[in-house]
Amino acid sequence: MTERSGCKLRVIWLWFSVIFSNFTPSRLLTQLLTGLIVIVLNLPFAFAKQVNIEHFNTDASRVEQLIDTNLTLALKRLIVYQPLVSELSIKQQLLYYKLLAEIYVEQGQYTQGKTTANQGLNIAKQLASPSIKITELLYIRGFAFESLGHIPDAREDYKKGLEVAESLHNKVFIAYGLINLGAIYYLSDDYERSLVVLNDAFNIAEQTSDEELKGSVNSELGILYSYLQQDKQSMAYYQQAYAHFKKAGKLHAALNSLHNIAINHNSNERYAQAIAVFKTIIAESKNTSSDSEILYGVYSGMAWAHLEQEESNPEAAYQYLMQAKQFIDFTEQHSVLVQFYINQAFILFELKQYDKTLVSIDKAEAMLAEQSQLSSLQKHSIISLHNLRANTLFEQQQFEQAYQLKTQVLLDIAAMDDKEDTRSVEQVRLHLESEQADARNKALQDQNLLHEAALTQAKIANEEENIYLLLSALAALAFAWLLVKLLQGKKKLKIASSVDPLTGVVNRRSLIHQGNKSLALACQKEFAYSVLMIDIDHFKQINDNLGHRQGDSVLVEISKLGQIMMRKTDIFGRYGGEEFIVLLPKTSLAQAKIIAERLRVAIAEITWPMTSLEKVTVSIGVASKQAHEKGDLLSLINTADERLYQAKAQGRDRVCG
């Protein structure tokens, strides 16, 4: 289950909303009705322009208010201007497309919302100077991309929208841009960066009287802390978000916050409390235009609570899931559809409908396979589905297949633990309760040691009898899965050494530690201080074409060169993956750019022994604090990272600062 509601709200689907891309009989009827209603709405204006375009601004203001309370009326009031759009001024056209795109997104019709936002952005090209409407259109299109599962496209739109807001010095929309990026970062498992930008948004929101903005940032912080397993803090943020949204009169957003609170109860096995909150949402949703995705989440959450509570009731769970099903046809949101099939598979298993369980598993796995990049939660979902498939095969007495799949599940879990990128979580841990985290880590290690001992003992016993071999192995693996499920969501926080084992340079943890000390000294002595963020261009292609061993060789050679070229006071380290950081005390921005350019050229001139690798280039972002300024290392790194993205966008193999 997901606790993400997003910054944009989605309300109940309307018969005259959009034409779906998939043609089923029911949807074809929907399209015919859609066309008929649009025609009826426009009949009064087909022959004479009875709508006065001078009234557009007044009607647009009314539509903005109606979006929060009555989407049906909002769309009806806006759509009458469709035949006259070309006669509106450029600014009015932008407002028209912004409102229409927002309505589509609020309905969960993300493809149509994206298309409408594109129309508005094309109109915006005629403007002589930037407008905040450009930011709004980019944020709406970004949210549509995000909801459709296109995370890289969403990130780019959010960044572009943020740049426009910054150029216009609009604090509120700067904050919303940071909120959107913070969500993208936690969805991409970059918790450290998410924490930084969401805290920046929180600080901006606190300087305003905008209750909706405060609600939005509290909501996203609640979700982030739930990802970090900080449940009490997560709940506190959700409750604050609910209070802010209620104060702002944003009823849909307030229901989203209640939904997150209920999921928090579910995740912590407080099922009776979760059910009570879900019932409150159902009651309150009767007073407003219901949000199909919220109601899907409510009934889906009710199903899960009835399945998992101490007195499990799979029959009731299935009935609630079927109530939820009526809402999923009204959304294009990828995560909602995947979650439905996952929930359905688990409930059908408890109902002993094993053939149908396998069908639901197949559908969920197929949808996850469509994703170009999976988050850690999605990877855990895949493993969970594999384990459920193994349990189902066991119940169908396909013991050999069940055993093989269970064994593979354990191997996958071990591989994920080895490969999981914990660098960001480690850095977030430095901001949170390090002593408690270390204690938790030790407890997990102790439990793993006990588990390994149990498996070893079982293996010795299994050698005595072939029949007992299969049954004991399955029992041990079932125990292993129960242990994994018990520990699920509690990420292991590994204490990294100070040196990167591959390249021999300092690692991310040591970079941050040494950087904080050297920057503090620079601020105290009023020295300039600079940071270089370096990324190897097209590194994935090197790994894909030449293999990871050759990719590792590239990382090692660049690390050696970086160490040689830096001064004794500089710190060159590996930030993670193909990214490196250089910390430059007593170095101005101009000096840092010279150093960066010299390093860029030197790397480009390396002669590689691999015949198929002629040249390796890097892009470098530079950030600096002046001598008299105070500085924050994470802010400098974030700025350098943003300038690195600029270097990438400008064609790579260059320095931006």
Image: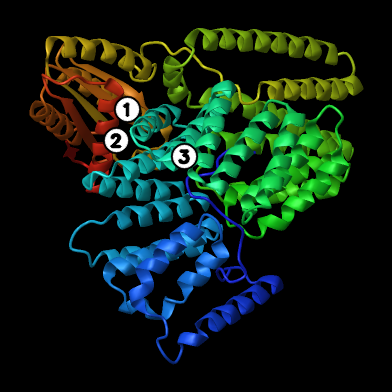
Depth order, front residue of 18/453: 18
Residue 474 picture quarter: top right
Q: CA distance from mark 2 to mark 1?
A: 9 Å
- Evaluate if marks 2 and 1 touch, with contact meaning CB atoms under 8 Å apart: yes
Q: Is residue 497 left or right of residue 398?
A: left
Q: Examine the rendering and report whether any part of residue 101 can be seen.
A: no
Disc 2 target residue: 536
In the rendered image, the quadrant that contains the C terminus is top left
The image's mark for residue 555 is: 1
- Residue 525 image position (x, y, % from top left): 13, 9
> Residue at the spot x=73%, y=30% of the render?
273
Is any atom of residue 454 visible in this view? yes
**Rendered position, 579 above or below 349:** above
Residue occupied by mark 3: 216
The quadrant of the rendering that contains the N terminus is top right
Most foreground residue, 523 or 511: 523
On screen, residue 517 above or below 153: above
Q: Residue furthest bottom?
A: 47
Identity of the amino acid at label 1? Leu
Q: Mark 3 falls on what kind of element?
A: helix
